[in-house]
Structure formats: C-alpha cells, structure tokens
Amino acid sequence: VDRSGSMGGAYIKAAGEALLLFLRSIPPGCLFNVIGFGSRFIRLFDKSVPYDQTSLEKATAHASSLRADLGGTELLAPLKSIVSEPVQEGHPRQVFVLTDGSVSNTDEVISIVSRFSNSTRCFAVGIGSGASTHLVNGIAKAGNGTAEFVLENERLQTKVMRMMKQALQASVHDVRLEWKIPSAADVKQTPEVLPPIFAGSRIVVYGIPTFHEDTENSDSDKTVNCQATLVYRQGQDATRQVIAFSLEKTPRTEDKEADLLPLHRLAGKQVLRDLTNKNPQDKLNLVGVSLETGVVCKETAFVAVGEDGTEAVIGAVEKQTIAVATQQLRMCALSYNVSSAPLQRYSAQTMMASNIDQVLTRGERLDLLCDQSEDLASNAMMFSKSASVHRQGRASQKIGSALSA
C-alpha cells in the first residue's frame, strides 16, 4: 500500500477501504501480509501469517488507521524484498499494489515484476487521476495480473471484488498461437507475447502474413485455406485447439490508402504499441510502421496541406465534421469469417459489428459534447460582455438575458 505523502486525504482513505475489501475477501487457509511503502517500507507482520481471526483483526485495525507518512514513493525496494523470499509450497504468491502516483524508475519496477512472474503474480490498483497508467498497467501485464483504476468519488467495491475474483481463479496461461498460412514467408503476430486469460476477459490477436511477391501477384489459388493452433495451459494441463479460416487474395492498387482497411489500421496500432513497450527509442521502426499503416504515433503527425499550396492559411481554425463511413466499416466486419472455432460463443461478425457500432456511438456523443461546450463558451462570452457594459442600473436584467440565451 502506497503511504507516500501524496496519498494524503481522500487517497489514503480510499486505499484503506480497498485494503479492507481485500482482507475480507481472502479465503480461509491463505497466508497474507500488508506492506506500506514510501521512502522506506514497513511490514505489518515479520512474515506472511495464516489468515485467521487474530491476524484479520490486527490487519483490519491497521487498514482503518492508515497514514500517508512515509515520504516519497519507492516501490522497487519492497518488491525486491517480496520476491527474494521463497514461495511456500501450496501457497502461490500474489501481490496487490495500491498506489496513487508514479515512480522515477518505472522500467526497473516492471522489469523485476517480469523476471519473477513465474513465481509471483502481480495486480495493481491506480487510485486517483494522477496514477501512472504506464506503471499500473506495466506491473499488471508483466506480473500476469490485471489492473484497475479508481477515480475520485468512484465506487471501489466493484473493481476490488472483480480483481479478487480474478486472483482467486485459475487462469489460462502460456497462451500462444501457431500460424499455418500456405505460401506465406512469415507471419508477424501482435501482440507478440499473449497474456494470461481470465474468465470473462478476452484478447485480440492479429496475424499479419507476408507473402513472396511472385505468390502475391499470381492468379492461382485466390482463396488460401489456413489454420491457427491455439495452445494454452490451465494448471498443469496443456490444450491445443485448431482454428480453421480462409483468406481471399486481393490485388494491390496504386492507391495505397484505399488498400488499407480499418482492420489493417487496428493491427498497425497494436504493432506500434508493442514497439513502444519494447523499445520507446526505436524511432526508425516506429516511423516506418506509422507511415506504412497510416496510424500516428509519438514520432509522427498528420499535417494538412492546401490543394493549391500557394498561400498560407490565416485566421481561426474552423471545425469540419467528416461523416464516418459506417456502412464500409460494417461491411468490413461482416466480411470477416472464422469457421470451426468451437470455443466461440458468438459469431465473429456479430461481435465485431457490435463493437464498431459502440465506437461510432461514442464518436457521436463526443461530437455532441463538443457542440455543447461551444454553446457554453458562447453563453459565457455573452455573459462577460453584458456584465462589463452594464455594470450599473439594469446590469442584472442584461445578465439574465445572456444566461437565458
């Protein structure tokens, strides 16, 4: 539990409430401990103790009296102390990190979590709007756990209980896909390393095949029958499942932008995310993928250029609403077809079309919010002008008119 100075006030109270929920959700027979960290770290117990009435009462009293009194935020030292201890037989180790901020050595923290991920599973809860998404998500991903963020005035119970439920259930781990695509020189998978899968969660994996140029331009075998073998472990049991699908060869055109479907851009976005997580300084590859897929990253940007290119554009920026090609997106979703996939409970077409509808709906809501904010700004300007001109006499009447407008 983060007990640094920045956790003062509402944040330390939220951390205490989350800790109480965790403590009351631990099943009998477990071992547990509570560690507060800041510039230094303090253990509630010298070592993990059995979960019983005595230990629970002491931990509950501790959670109810948490103080943000440990200075700065240093997470690496307590994590090193935890993973240096041997795992007790029959008690797989799981660590829950509650923090409100960031640390100066985020990469080192994530690295040690990843190094001991086979023996220690890590979950993370970010409290407040200032919690580092890179730190919280990085700990969860490297530690084969999950991450949750709790903002101000947001209910803790649902998120904490969801995390505990995932922690107490066995996950599907060591997940990988073995691709078999005839004539493909290579298949790039993104994300490269697949995380563990919990009940009720899902992952999206893209396979990007590269064909030999002569094969790609040939007229034979327009339809390629392919398969991907899903391999995973649940406990000690290994499972293999073959997923059959087909690809339709489509000749390239001179219009590179027209060749890129929304699905290609989504895959490109995931590739950029992988590259950024692996090596944020790999500017050459980031720029290359960004230009190839038409998806911006931290090293690229869209620049609008006038058609005539002769005169500089001077004046206020004008907002233009561009209609989204809704039907085109839905047709792309419906054209995707996966057969012989026994684990699929819903058709891929329906799920993808539903997701696209949700994205479009959110876009429309954002446009509405933009319009409302512009109206509010306009009303505020009217209010300001009326107040400055009519400071005496009928000022109140004019202000009321501006507000009603």
Image (cartoon, rainbow, N blue to C red):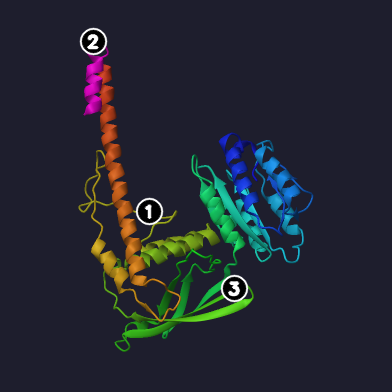
Name the kind of residue labelled 1 in the image.
Answer: Ala
Inspect the magenta stretch and tell me whether residue 78 lies in it: no
* Disc with the residue nearer the chain's start (2 vs 3): 3
Name the kind of residue labelled 3 in the image.
Answer: Gln
Pick the front one: 154 or 135: 154
Tell me: 303 left or right of 228: left
Which numbered disc covers residue 234?
3
Quarter of the figure with residue 259? bottom left
Q: Residue furthest right?
A: 46
Name the kind of residue labelled 2 in the image.
Answer: Gly
**Percent from the top left, x then y, of residue 155?**
50, 45
Q: Which residues are magenta?
A: 390-405
The residue lying at 78 percent from left, 53 percent from top is 47
Label 1: few (<14), some or many (≥20) within 10 Å? few
Residue under numbered circle 1: 301
Which numbered disc covers residue 393?
2
Inspect the magenta stretch and tell me whether residue 393 lies in it: yes
> Does residue 383 show up?
yes
C-alpha span from label 1 to label 2 = 53 Å
The residue lying at 41 percent from left, 83 percent from top is 226
**Vertical arrangement, residue 383 with respect to residue 132, above or below:** above
**Percent from the top left, x then y, of residue 215?**
36, 85
**Percent from the top left, x then y, of residue 57?**
72, 45
C-alpha span from label 1 to label 3 = 43 Å
Which quadrant holds the C terminus? top left
C-alpha span from label 2 to label 3 = 78 Å
Q: Secondary structure at mark 2?
A: loop
Which numbered disc covers residue 342?
none
